[in-house]
């Protein structure tokens, strides 16, 4: 795949992916959002507009666009925005790709381990059933929409990312300051499992999906699941500070609201990347300590 279009190219994963593709000497088409009057804009999903010829001659699409589930409280308006930025935007994109005389061969899309919901200690693979809750419903709708690309001859790969560990953005960036001043610690008891992955492995999984004849849903998480207590201990060690100041669950519910806190922070997902490893992908960082060491290097 030598000409690859990326939506969400300015985000955490998108920026790292662009750098990697450039190193590999592949041509990247950045799908900037904007109004029709903006010459650099290629689409505006809110208005249902895609610039004619925007994706002409692209071998592949990597679809990463979507509002962050971790930014802001989940008001009803915010939840509608999260759904629209994923489900509705994907519909606009695929409807346009379906009209092209020569369509991309592969459609790789971000998805989320939130598909599985709060499952405690249950081992979860791609064969596991959908969970319950807003995030689970959001991912299901998102994947259902991306699956439509297969109807138009594209190979579809849905990458269910865990929390991306990178110091330049995402959850880890927010946590670094309290941990560096010794105010970090386990949340809600720390027994809940966390689905995590290093930024390098997240990007590597996208490249792997572009270059290998795989399709369907794949978990992109560290092969060795970690609890919140494991994560906080490893992060404290990485920044050379104690990680013993607990954050009770009720405090998180007050800060974020019960629904968001329960689904994003206090719920557990013990996810394994079974299909990805079976396809031949090798993780650079197989556990939380290695992933954090890479992120903070």
Image (cartoon, grey):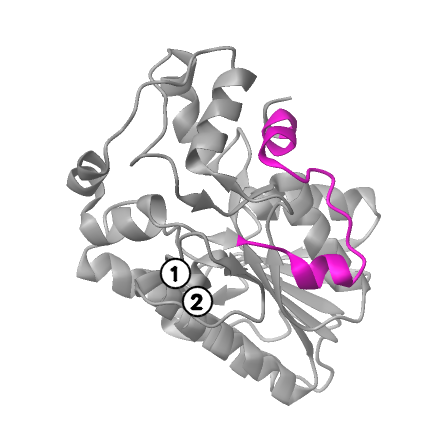
Stretch of the chain drawn in magenta: 271-294
Quick one: 161 or 82, which is closer to the camera? 161
Measured from the top left, where is residue 16 in percent x and y? Answer: 64, 42
Q: Residues within 10 Å of mark 2 (few under 14, many from 20)?
A: many
Measured from the top left, where is residue 9 in percent x and y? Answer: 58, 51
Q: Quadrant of the N terminus?
A: bottom right
Measured from the top left, where is residue 257 in percent x and y? Answer: 18, 47
Q: Earlier in the sequence, mark 1 or mark 2?
A: 1
The part of the image, by quadrant, that contains residue 76 is bottom left
The mark closer to the camera, 1 or 2, is 1
Q: Is residue 11 visible to us here?
A: no
- Asked if the residue under mark 2 is in contact with the one under mark 1, i.e. CB atoms within 8 Å, the reply is no
Which residue carries the number 2 mark? 139
* Mark sitting on residue 45: none
162 to 249, vertically: above or below: below
Which residue carries the number 1 mark? 117
**Residue ID at (60%, 55%):** 272
Q: Is residue 63 left or right of residue 268?
A: right
**Residue ID at (35%, 48%):** 264
**Residue ID at (20%, 60%):** 77
Measured from the top left, where is residue 60 in percent x and y? Answer: 71, 67
**Residue ID at (76%, 62%):** 278
The part of the image, by quadrant, that contains residue 289 is top right
Quick one: 189 or 266, which is closer to the camera? 189
Q: Count up the numbered dots.
A: 2
The CA span between labels 1 and 2 is 10 Å
Q: Is residue 165 visible to us here?
A: yes
Q: Is residue 275 left or right of residue 94?
A: right
Q: Is residue 76 magenta?
A: no
Quick one: 288 or 55, which is closer to the camera? 288
């Amino acid at each position: 795949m030598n000409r690859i279009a990326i939506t969400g190219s300015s985000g955490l994963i998108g920026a790292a992916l662009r750098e990697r593709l450039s190193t590999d000497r592949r041509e990247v088409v950045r799908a900037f959002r904007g109004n029709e009057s903006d010459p650099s804009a290629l689409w505006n999903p809110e208005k249902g507009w895609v610039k004619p010829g925007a994706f002409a001659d692209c071998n592949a699409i990597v679809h990463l666009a979507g509002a962050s589930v971790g930014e802001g409280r989940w008001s009803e308006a915010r939840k509608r925005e999260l759904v629209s930025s994923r489900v509705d935007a994907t519909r606009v994109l695929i409807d346009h790709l379906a009209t092209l005389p020569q369509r991309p061969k592969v459609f790789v899309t971000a998805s989320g381990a939130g598909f599985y919901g709060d499952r405690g200690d249950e081992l979860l693979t791609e064969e596991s059933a959908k969970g319950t809750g807003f995030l689970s419903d959001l991912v299901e709708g998102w994947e259902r929409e991306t699956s439509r690309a297969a109807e138009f001859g594209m190979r579809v790969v849905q990458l269910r990312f865990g929390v991306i560990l990178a110091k330049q953005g995402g959850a880890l960036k927010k946590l670094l300051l309290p941990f560096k001043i010794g105010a970090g610690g386990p949340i809600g008891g720390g027994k809940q499992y966390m689905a995590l992955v290093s930024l390098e492995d997240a990007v590597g999984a996208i490249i792997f999906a572009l270059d290998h004849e795989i399709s369907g849903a794949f978990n992109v998480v560290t092969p060795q699941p970690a609890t919140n207590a494991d994560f906080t201990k490893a992060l404290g060690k990485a920044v050379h500070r104690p990680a013993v100041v607990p954050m009770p669950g009720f405090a998180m519910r007050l800060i974020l609201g019960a629904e968001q806190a329960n689904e994003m922070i206090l719920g557990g997902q013990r996810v394994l990347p079974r299909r990805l490893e079976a396809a031949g992908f090798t993780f650079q960082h197989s556990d939380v300590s290695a992933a954090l060491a890479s992120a903070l290097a």
